[in-house]
Image: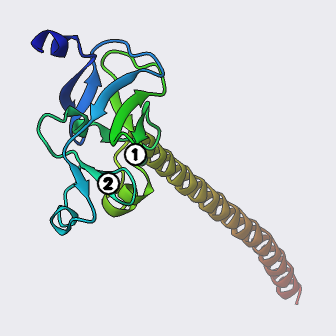
Amino acid sequence: MPAISSNKPYRVGRSKTGLGLFATKPIKKGTRIIRYFGPILDSRIPAHDEIENKYLFELNGRWTIDGSVRKNLARYINHSCRPNAESDVRPRERKVFIRAIKNIEPGDEINYDYGTDYFKAYLKPIGCKCDSCEKKRKKLRAEARAQRTKAKARAERKAAKAGAKSAKKKAPKKNQLNGHAVAKTNGRARA
Ligand SMILES: [Zn+2]
Protein backbone atom coordinates (compact mmCIF):
# COMPACT_ATOMS: atom_id res chain seq x y z
CA MET A 1 0.00 0.00 0.00
CA PRO A 2 2.70 2.61 0.81
CA ALA A 3 4.31 1.89 -2.57
CA ILE A 4 1.00 2.58 -4.29
CA SER A 5 0.42 5.71 -2.26
CA SER A 6 3.79 7.16 -3.28
CA ASN A 7 2.80 6.48 -6.88
CA LYS A 8 -0.27 8.60 -6.57
CA PRO A 9 -0.12 11.70 -8.73
CA TYR A 10 -1.25 14.05 -5.98
CA ARG A 11 -0.52 15.32 -2.52
CA VAL A 12 -2.33 17.40 0.06
CA GLY A 13 -0.88 20.88 0.33
CA ARG A 14 -1.55 24.45 1.33
CA SER A 15 -3.97 26.31 -0.90
CA LYS A 16 -5.28 29.87 -0.75
CA THR A 17 -8.28 28.78 1.29
CA GLY A 18 -6.67 26.19 3.55
CA LEU A 19 -5.71 22.80 2.23
CA GLY A 20 -6.04 21.48 -1.27
CA LEU A 21 -5.03 18.60 -3.47
CA PHE A 22 -2.12 19.24 -5.84
CA ALA A 23 -0.79 17.27 -8.78
CA THR A 24 2.70 15.83 -8.27
CA LYS A 25 2.87 14.31 -11.76
CA PRO A 26 1.40 15.22 -15.12
CA ILE A 27 -2.20 13.98 -15.25
CA LYS A 28 -3.68 13.47 -18.68
CA LYS A 29 -7.12 14.75 -19.54
CA GLY A 30 -9.68 11.98 -19.03
CA THR A 31 -7.70 10.18 -16.31
CA ARG A 32 -9.36 9.06 -13.10
CA ILE A 33 -7.40 10.81 -10.39
CA ILE A 34 -8.95 9.68 -7.15
CA ARG A 35 -12.09 8.15 -5.74
CA TYR A 36 -14.31 10.21 -3.47
CA PHE A 37 -15.37 7.70 -0.85
CA GLY A 38 -16.88 7.21 2.58
CA PRO A 39 -19.80 5.53 4.27
CA ILE A 40 -22.95 5.37 2.17
CA LEU A 41 -25.87 7.12 3.82
CA ASP A 42 -29.46 6.18 3.13
CA SER A 43 -31.87 9.11 3.35
CA ARG A 44 -34.63 6.67 4.38
CA ILE A 45 -32.80 5.96 7.63
CA PRO A 46 -33.51 8.89 9.98
CA ALA A 47 -30.14 8.61 11.74
CA HIS A 48 -28.39 8.85 8.36
CA ASP A 49 -30.60 11.69 7.25
CA GLU A 50 -29.56 13.70 10.30
CA ILE A 51 -25.87 13.62 9.43
CA GLU A 52 -24.74 17.02 8.27
CA ASN A 53 -21.25 18.05 7.16
CA LYS A 54 -19.52 19.81 4.31
CA TYR A 55 -18.36 16.57 2.71
CA LEU A 56 -21.67 14.95 1.89
CA PHE A 57 -21.77 13.94 -1.74
CA GLU A 58 -25.30 13.24 -2.90
CA LEU A 59 -25.51 10.42 -5.43
CA ASN A 60 -29.24 10.71 -5.92
CA GLY A 61 -32.39 11.30 -3.88
CA ARG A 62 -31.66 8.32 -1.66
CA TRP A 63 -27.92 7.70 -1.45
CA THR A 64 -25.22 10.02 -0.19
CA ILE A 65 -21.52 9.47 0.39
CA ASP A 66 -20.26 10.82 3.69
CA GLY A 67 -16.81 11.94 2.56
CA SER A 68 -15.77 13.37 5.92
CA VAL A 69 -13.63 10.29 6.73
CA ARG A 70 -9.91 10.99 7.08
CA LYS A 71 -8.82 8.50 4.46
CA ASN A 72 -10.89 10.23 1.82
CA LEU A 73 -8.18 12.53 0.47
CA ALA A 74 -10.54 13.62 -2.30
CA ARG A 75 -12.30 15.71 0.33
CA TYR A 76 -9.34 18.12 0.13
CA ILE A 77 -10.14 18.97 -3.47
CA ASN A 78 -11.44 22.52 -3.57
CA HIS A 79 -14.20 23.89 -5.69
CA SER A 80 -13.53 25.89 -8.81
CA CYS A 81 -15.98 27.53 -11.20
CA ARG A 82 -13.51 26.74 -14.01
CA PRO A 83 -12.06 23.44 -12.85
CA ASN A 84 -9.51 21.05 -14.31
CA ALA A 85 -11.39 17.98 -13.09
CA GLU A 86 -14.95 16.77 -12.68
CA SER A 87 -16.85 14.35 -10.51
CA ASP A 88 -17.82 11.19 -12.34
CA VAL A 89 -20.87 10.08 -10.37
CA ARG A 90 -21.97 6.46 -10.58
CA PRO A 91 -25.19 6.22 -8.53
CA ARG A 92 -25.73 2.54 -9.39
CA GLU A 93 -22.28 1.58 -8.14
CA ARG A 94 -22.57 4.22 -5.41
CA LYS A 95 -19.19 5.49 -6.40
CA VAL A 96 -17.72 8.83 -7.32
CA PHE A 97 -14.45 9.33 -9.14
CA ILE A 98 -12.69 12.58 -9.78
CA ARG A 99 -11.52 12.72 -13.37
CA ALA A 100 -9.27 15.18 -15.15
CA ILE A 101 -11.01 17.24 -17.81
CA LYS A 102 -7.80 19.04 -18.74
CA ASN A 103 -4.16 18.06 -18.82
CA ILE A 104 -2.93 18.86 -15.34
CA GLU A 105 0.68 19.80 -14.67
CA PRO A 106 2.69 18.95 -11.53
CA GLY A 107 2.09 21.66 -8.95
CA ASP A 108 -1.38 22.53 -10.28
CA GLU A 109 -4.16 22.44 -7.76
CA ILE A 110 -6.81 19.89 -8.67
CA ASN A 111 -10.37 21.14 -8.46
CA TYR A 112 -13.86 20.43 -9.66
CA ASP A 113 -17.18 22.23 -9.71
CA TYR A 114 -19.14 21.35 -6.59
CA GLY A 115 -22.42 22.24 -8.29
CA THR A 116 -25.03 24.91 -7.80
CA ASP A 117 -26.54 23.62 -4.53
CA TYR A 118 -23.21 23.67 -2.73
CA PHE A 119 -22.27 26.97 -4.33
CA LYS A 120 -25.48 28.62 -3.15
CA ALA A 121 -25.32 27.15 0.35
CA TYR A 122 -21.62 27.58 1.17
CA LEU A 123 -19.74 29.70 -1.36
CA LYS A 124 -22.07 32.48 -2.43
CA PRO A 125 -22.53 33.82 1.13
CA ILE A 126 -18.76 34.18 1.66
CA GLY A 127 -17.77 34.83 -1.95
CA CYS A 128 -16.17 32.14 -4.07
CA LYS A 129 -12.37 32.22 -3.78
CA CYS A 130 -11.60 30.17 -6.88
CA ASP A 131 -9.11 31.56 -9.42
CA SER A 132 -11.84 32.20 -11.95
CA CYS A 133 -13.91 34.25 -9.50
CA GLU A 134 -10.81 36.06 -8.20
CA LYS A 135 -9.93 36.97 -11.78
CA LYS A 136 -13.49 38.16 -12.41
CA ARG A 137 -13.41 40.30 -9.27
CA LYS A 138 -10.02 41.71 -10.27
CA LYS A 139 -11.37 42.56 -13.72
CA LEU A 140 -14.44 44.23 -12.22
CA ARG A 141 -12.24 46.22 -9.84
CA ALA A 142 -10.01 47.30 -12.74
CA GLU A 143 -13.07 48.28 -14.77
CA ALA A 144 -14.48 50.27 -11.85
CA ARG A 145 -11.11 51.96 -11.43
CA ALA A 146 -11.02 52.80 -15.17
CA GLN A 147 -14.56 54.16 -14.94
CA ARG A 148 -13.60 56.37 -12.01
CA THR A 149 -10.49 57.64 -13.86
CA LYS A 150 -12.62 58.35 -16.93
CA ALA A 151 -15.25 60.19 -14.89
CA LYS A 152 -12.52 62.20 -13.17
CA ALA A 153 -10.94 63.12 -16.51
CA ARG A 154 -14.35 64.10 -17.85
CA ALA A 155 -15.03 66.26 -14.81
CA GLU A 156 -11.60 67.87 -15.15
CA ARG A 157 -12.16 68.58 -18.84
CA LYS A 158 -15.55 70.08 -18.01
CA ALA A 159 -14.06 72.23 -15.29
CA ALA A 160 -11.26 73.34 -17.61
CA LYS A 161 -13.79 74.22 -20.31
CA ALA A 162 -15.94 76.13 -17.85
CA GLY A 163 -12.85 77.96 -16.65
CA ALA A 164 -11.88 78.86 -20.21
CA LYS A 165 -15.43 80.01 -20.96
CA SER A 166 -15.61 82.28 -17.94
CA ALA A 167 -12.17 83.63 -18.78
CA LYS A 168 -13.34 84.31 -22.32
CA LYS A 169 -16.52 85.94 -21.03
CA LYS A 170 -14.55 88.13 -18.67
CA ALA A 171 -12.09 89.17 -21.32
CA PRO A 172 -14.53 90.84 -23.71
CA LYS A 173 -16.33 92.43 -20.77
CA LYS A 174 -13.11 94.06 -19.72
CA ASN A 175 -12.56 95.33 -23.23
CA GLN A 176 -16.09 96.55 -23.40
CA LEU A 177 -15.74 98.26 -20.07
CA ASN A 178 -12.44 99.68 -21.11
CA GLY A 179 -13.94 100.85 -24.34
CA HIS A 180 -16.93 102.26 -22.55
CA ALA A 181 -14.82 103.85 -19.91
CA VAL A 182 -12.54 105.23 -22.53
CA ALA A 183 -15.48 106.56 -24.49
CA LYS A 184 -17.01 108.02 -21.32
CA THR A 185 -13.86 109.70 -20.19
CA ASN A 186 -13.44 110.82 -23.70
CA GLY A 187 -16.97 112.17 -23.55
CA ARG A 188 -16.42 113.74 -20.19
CA ALA A 189 -13.17 115.08 -21.28
CA ARG A 190 -14.89 116.51 -24.24
CA ALA A 191 -17.69 117.92 -22.11
ZN1 LIG B 1 -15.65 30.54 -8.31
- Quadrant position of residue 177: bottom right
Kindly identify the amino acid type of the residue bearing the numbered disc 1: Pro
Q: What residue appears at the point 61 percent right and 62 percent down from the top-left corner?
A: 155
Position in image of residue 61 (x %, y %): 39, 60
Label 1, ligand 1: CB separation under 8 Å: no
Disc 1 is placed on an element classified as loop
Query: Which residue was labeled with disc 2?
Result: 63
- Quadrant position of residue 26: top left
The answer to whether residue 119 is above or below residue 4 is: below
Query: Which residue was labeled with disc 1?
Result: 91
- Quadrant position of residue 99: top left
Q: In which quadrant is the N terminus drawn? A: top left
Disc 2 is placed on an element classified as strand
Position in image of residue 45 (x %, y %): 21, 65
Whether the residues at callouts 1 and 2 have beta carbons within 8 Å, the answer is: yes
Q: Earlier in the sequence, mark 1 or mark 2?
A: 2
Q: Is residue 29 left or right of residue 152?
A: left
Q: In which quadrant is the C terminus drawn? A: bottom right
- On residue 168, the disc is none
Kindly identify the amino acid type of the residue bearing the numbered disc 2: Trp
The answer to whether residue 22 is above or below residue 131 is: above
Q: What residue appears at the point 52 percent right and 54 percent down from the top-left corner?
A: 144
Position in image of residue 89 (x %, y %): 41, 41
